[in-house]
């Protein structure tokens, strides 16, 4: 597990890019308060998903508005296609930790 952010510093619906040895991960505190971690690159044109939004468990790419399930990584709306990896998240004493090895 690696430290991503303090939970209080994550703005609901907004993303944070977490750089790891295996690639970047987008970390979101959803508008419902749940925290998700998903591959940072949209599989349409490679835009950073951390620049997008996460509402009601749906990650929306800012570039062309392809959508993914924040829980499963499955594509929900074109032009996104295929699926993305999601990663386990733990909240410990107000800190967000992500396991980048368990996709």
Image: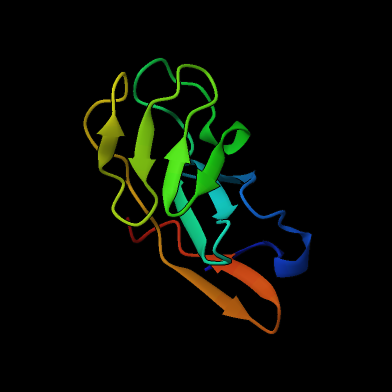
Q: Nearer the viewer, residue 82 or 25?
A: 82
Q: Residue at x 58, y 66 (%)?
A: 33
Residue 39 visible, this angle? no
Q: Residue at x 40, y 58 (%)?
A: 87
Image quadrant in which you'd find residue 29:
bottom right
Color theme of the render: rainbow
Question: Residue 4: x and y, percent?
Answer: 64, 59
Point out the image quarter for the C terminus: bottom left
Image quadrant in which you'd find residue 10:
bottom right
Question: Residue 64: x and y, percent?
Answer: 45, 17
47 over 12 or under it: above or below: above
Q: Residue furthest bottom?
A: 93
Question: Residue 3: x and y, percent?
Answer: 64, 65
89 over 24 or under it: above or below: below
Residue 42 visible, this angle? yes
29 over 78 or under it: above or below: below
Q: Residue at x 46, y 54 (%)?
A: 56
Q: Nearer the viewer, residue 8 or 99?
A: 8
Q: Residue furthest right?
A: 9
How many marks the image carries: the answer is 0
Q: Residue at x 56, y 51 (%)?
A: 27
Question: Residue 98: x and y, percent?
Answer: 52, 63
Left or right, 6 with respect to 85, comes to right
Left or right, 61 with respect to 71, comes to right
């Amino acid at each position: 597990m690696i430290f991503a952010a303090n939970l209080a510093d994550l703005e609901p619906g907004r993303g944070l890019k977490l750089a790891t040895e295996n690639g970047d991960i987008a970390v979101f505190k959803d508008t419902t308060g749940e925290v998700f971690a998903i591959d940072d690159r949209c599989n349409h044109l490679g835009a950073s998903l951390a620049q997008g939004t996460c509402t009601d468990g749906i990650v929306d790419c800012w570039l062309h508005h392809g959508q993914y399930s924040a829980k499963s990584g499955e594509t929900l709306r074109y032009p996104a296609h295929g699926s993305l990896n999601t990663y386990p998240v733990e909240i410990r004493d107000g800190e967000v930790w992500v396991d980048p090895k368990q996709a």
